[in-house]
Image (spheres, rainbow, N blue to C red):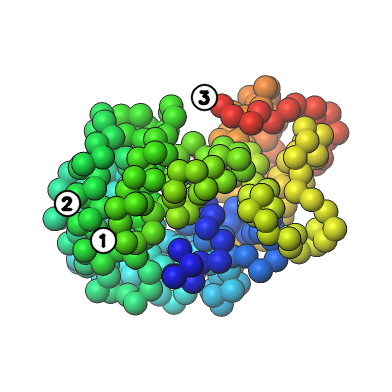
């Protein structure tokens, strides 16, 4: 990944309803000084993008630092047709994204109906043509996020053929969510498969799926041979995982404002940090979605629901977030709950 100018081989995945500007800004508070984690937007429909307005569409909001190229983000495109992809990329260029990603992993029915998402994994030549098309619209890095298998099995030979076609189509790097379409987000991801593909490709290959702890991320990089690692749901419960991984990879710097500290690790430290992260997210939601408070509250609840699976009494926490009537009220509820909170954050869920 270093050849592409990436200084930190850790990224955060596209997640619908979660990967908005406020979440990205909160996560970056945990990036040690000097490192630029690439953070994805949620998947964006290229059918809709051409007619959407940059200023008012919630999913297209960006920070000033992102637009200035100081912080790095990648919009993920959903689609396969030139008449939509070309104007979509033209629309996004003014936001100054670091690159563009093509979704070839989403298994949702409405996505499959249009031959988007994981359906694109069915035909290597066709998928490579989509890469060629995106490649022809931009000189920024182009990547593809796919699954380990399009249906019930992760088939190394097919994935080899498929990723080779994408490489020949001009993809600069590839991310493999090493679960099959049938697995959804459940069960163990096959990191061996990612390592095998990384050995066979010239372009960088990033592992995604089931990266729940810093130890997972380090193992995937050092023991399984991935070139990069993409954290997804774990970033909703342990956003400081970026800091932990940097520390475990030997990076000495801390996030700005946290000089002299070590990344939270113990049960007590993580409990305290969780509420600090929640309050930081509330502040970012206020800043970026203060004009649509109901939307901001929904975004917070969805974040809480996703991360709460790692708590013993996660449902109770989520229920508290649902009571909020305003952003200030949400802040009060978080502060109150923090003082009564004593739940360990589990390392792993199954
Ligand atoms: C709420 C949610 C929304 C997601 N949205 C997207 C998406 O827009 N694009 C995409 O490629 N993957 C999406 N994913 C899949 C994640 O990017 C990731 O591949 C998956 O969660 C596996 O990683 P994990 O086991 O570490 O969570 C989504 C996952 C979740 C939980």
At x 52%, y 24%, the residue is: 350
Mark 3–mark 1 distance (CA, rounded to whole Å):
33 Å
Secondary structure of residue under mark 2: helix
Cβ atoms at labels 2 and 3 below 8 Å apart? no
* Dot 2 or dot 1, earlier in sequence: 2
Total numbered labels placed on residues in the image: 3
- Tell me where residue 7 appears, x and y as whole percent: 56, 66
What's the CA distance linking mark 2 and mark 1?
11 Å
* Residue labelled with disc 3: 350
Q: Nearer the viewer, mark 2 or mark 1?
A: 1
Instruction: Say which residue label 1 marks.
Output: 167
Task: Specify few, some or many for label 1: CA neighbours under 10 Å numbering under 14, 14-19, or 20 or more.
Answer: many
Q: Position of residue 204 (x, y in %)?
A: 39, 59
Element marked by disc 1: helix
Q: Position of residue 47 (x, y in %)?
A: 27, 58
Q: Determine which residue is flagged by label 2.
A: 124
Q: Tag 3: Cα neighbours inside 10 Å, few (<14), some, or many (≥20)?
A: few
Which is in the foreground here, disc 3 or disc 1?
1
Q: Position of residue 203 (x, y in %)?
A: 34, 61
Q: Earlier in the sequence, mark 3 or mark 1?
A: 1
């Amino acid at each position: 990944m270093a050849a592409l100018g990436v200084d930190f081989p850790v990224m955060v995945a596209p997640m619908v309803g979660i990967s908005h500007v406020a979440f990205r800004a909160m996560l970056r508070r945990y990036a040690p000084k000097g490192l630029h984690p690439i953070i994805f937007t949620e998947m964006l429909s290229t059918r809709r993008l051409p007619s959407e307005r940059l200023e008012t569409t919630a999913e297209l909001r960006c920070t000033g630092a992102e637009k200035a190229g100081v912080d790095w983000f990648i919009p993920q495109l959903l689609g396969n047709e030139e008449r939509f992809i070309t104007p979509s990329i033209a629309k996004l260029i003014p936001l100054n994204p670091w690159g563009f990603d093509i979704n070839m992993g989403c298994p949702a029915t409405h996505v499959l109906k249009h031959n988007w998402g994981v359906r694109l994994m069915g035909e290597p030549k066709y998928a490579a043509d989509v890469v060629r098309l995106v490649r022809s619209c931009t000189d920024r890095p182009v990547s593809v996020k796919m699954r380990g298998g399009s249906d019930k099995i992760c088939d190394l030979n097919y994935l080899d053929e498929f990723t080779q076609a994408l490489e020949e189509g001009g993809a600069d790097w590839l991310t493999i969510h090493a679960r099959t379409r049938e697995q959804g987000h459940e069960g163990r991801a096959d990191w061996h498969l990612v390592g095998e593909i990384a050995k066979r490709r010239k372009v960088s290959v990033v592992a995604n799926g089931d990266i729940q702890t810093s130890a997972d991320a380090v193992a995937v990089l050092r023991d399984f041979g991935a070139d990069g690692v993409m954290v997804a749901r774990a970033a909703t419960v342990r956003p400081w995982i970026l800091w932990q991984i940097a520390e475990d990879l030997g990076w000495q710097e801390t996030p700005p404002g946290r000089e002299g500290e070590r990344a939270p690790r113990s049960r007590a430290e993580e409990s305290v940090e969780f509420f600090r992260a929640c309050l930081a997210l509330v502040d970012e939601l206020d800043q970026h979605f203060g004009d649509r408070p109901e939307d901001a509250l929904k975004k917070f609840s969805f974040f809480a629901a996703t991360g709460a699976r790692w708590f013993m009494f996660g449902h109770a926490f989520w229920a508290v977030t649902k009571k909020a009537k305003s952003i200030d009220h949400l802040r009060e509820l978080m502060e109150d709950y923090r003082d009564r909170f004593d739940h360990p954050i589990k390392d792993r869920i199954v």
